[in-house]
Image: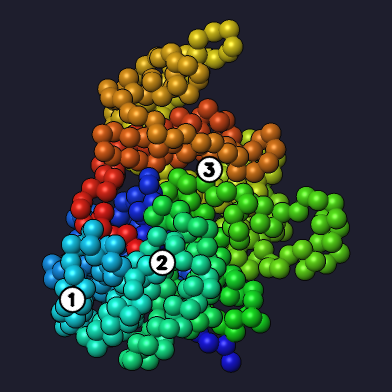
Amino acid sequence: MNRQIKIFDTTLRDGEQSPGCSMNIHEKLEIAKHLECLKVDVIEAGFAMASKEDFEAIKTIAKSIKGSSVAALARTLSKDVDAAWEAVKSAKQPRIHIFIATSDIHMRHKLKKTREQVLKDVGQIVKYAKKYCSDIEFSAEDATRSDPEFLYKVFETAIRSGATVINVPDTVGYTTPDEFYSLITKIRENVSNIDETTISVHCHDDLGMAVANTLSAVRAGATQLECTINGIGERAGNAALEEVVMALDTRKDLFGLTSNVDTTQIYRSSKLVSALLGTAIPPNKAIVGANAFAHEAGIHQHGVLSEKSTYEIMRPESIGLSENKIVLGKHSGRHAFDARVRELGYNLTKSELNRTFVRFKDLAGKKKVVSNLDIEALIQSKYTEVTGIYRLDRFIVNSGNTITSTASIKMINGDMTKEEVATGDGPMDAAFKAIEKIIGTSFMLEDYSVHSVTSGKDAQGEVIVKLRKDDNIVVGRGLSTDIVEAGIKAYLNAVNKMLSGATTQEEDTNAKKTDNF
């Protein structure tokens, strides 16, 4: 009989700490709901003391999620624990997650504390948190660079004080699979009360070994794995949930383990996080990249056509990819469209379905065949909508290699309309300057990327921009078969977010800066 592994998702906490990957409350809730559909065991919703926005986001998620535990992070400070509990107390399955650094380098240079002081803090704060919540996780930040003998004492103290989960983070992605296997094994052998708790691991990818280290820890006896969608996170990121889960699922013969994760929701969760954060998924990304199930070499194509298992160790359907059975086009009706949306695994409200169907009919008038990828892009385009400020009425762009690029943009704000003309170094620069003239302020364009949703001359183009104003950064996304229109929509989407206050200050509190395992 296979052993059960718990999946702890920290996309909303550690994942959000990726540069430029901050999210507002609505975006976090949307991802949390998808994680619940994915059936992860624990959703780490954030760090309550980091900011008022983080606290409110955790609280909102805790009230909404019923199928997964909801955790909030806290340092070994009573005020952190109080805030964490206030944020998660309405959850059906609340968890307080406490951490403190245990490596000499962190204790000396960051905490300015001795080993004795750290041990005292661990015992006192875990006991303090236990009065609020039965489910307490304790993490020893930078565990893989800590003195093992001291680490054993820290974990014994945490467990004796009430910790139900002890977490072993490879905070800076320093360890290797063999080393990590040995560390987990020695923790099991040398922590006297280890059988009273769950062993968890949290690996970073600085040396490209986060998933390998995580799987090595599983073989050594870890039973909770901490990861993020698409592997996002501090610096080089975290162990990617989709890679960890599919490795366990595909190699049951080796690991003999199962998880509660519904793997058919992996692809949609990956696309959602990518869309909301404005971070494109590399085509060669394992499991969810565009090339993960693509075959171009003739010998590979011949093998797959004869028997899929020759070159496919997983079925595309196992992660939520499906093949077209009914061709959708401009003559397709609402019923067929609704059926396809549900087949793809999306549960839209009636109003969302109506709005997406209108976009579909508009797209179908421009394309002969609308693919599943096109439909998913249309569904995700709802995340580009920021109402109540500016919306595009029309645009005209003139450009060429013998003329100065000129853009005329007309936008609507409530009952008011305004049109401006600007010149620039290329059509997009001119269009962006015209938008800025209308709103009366300028922004720093941090990043601009474009890619096609599908292949072909009539493919939808997706543009992602990142704008900065002072310390605030926002991500905008636009979609259209006209790449210039997609760029204008992306810029306007970002501007609307900025003006509506849906911005995030980079590392805006000292608390957030210390949150780094």
Q: Is residue 195 above or below residue 295?
A: below
Q: How far across and how far down the image is residue 299, in percent?
A: 85, 55
Amino acid type shown at disc 1: Glu
Q: How far across and how far down the image is residue 174, in percent?
A: 44, 62
Q: Which residue is mark 3?
A: 359
SS class, disc 2: strand
Q: Which residue is mark 2?
A: 170
SS class, disc 1: helix
Q: Is residue 192 above or below residue 343?
A: below
Q: Is residue 413 above or below residue 131?
A: above
- On residue 116, the disc is 1
* Quadrant of the rendering where the C terminus is positioned: bottom left
Which residue is drawn at the image coordinates 58% and 7% (left, top)? 402
Question: Mark 2 or mark 3, which is nearer to you?
Answer: 2
- Whether residue 229 is visible, yes or no, is no
The mark nearer the N terminus, 2 or 3, is 2
Q: Is residue 480 above or below residue 39?
A: above
Q: How far across and how far down the image is residue 131, in percent?
A: 16, 83
The mark nearer the N terminus, 1 or 2, is 1
Q: Is residue 48 left or right of residue 197?
A: left
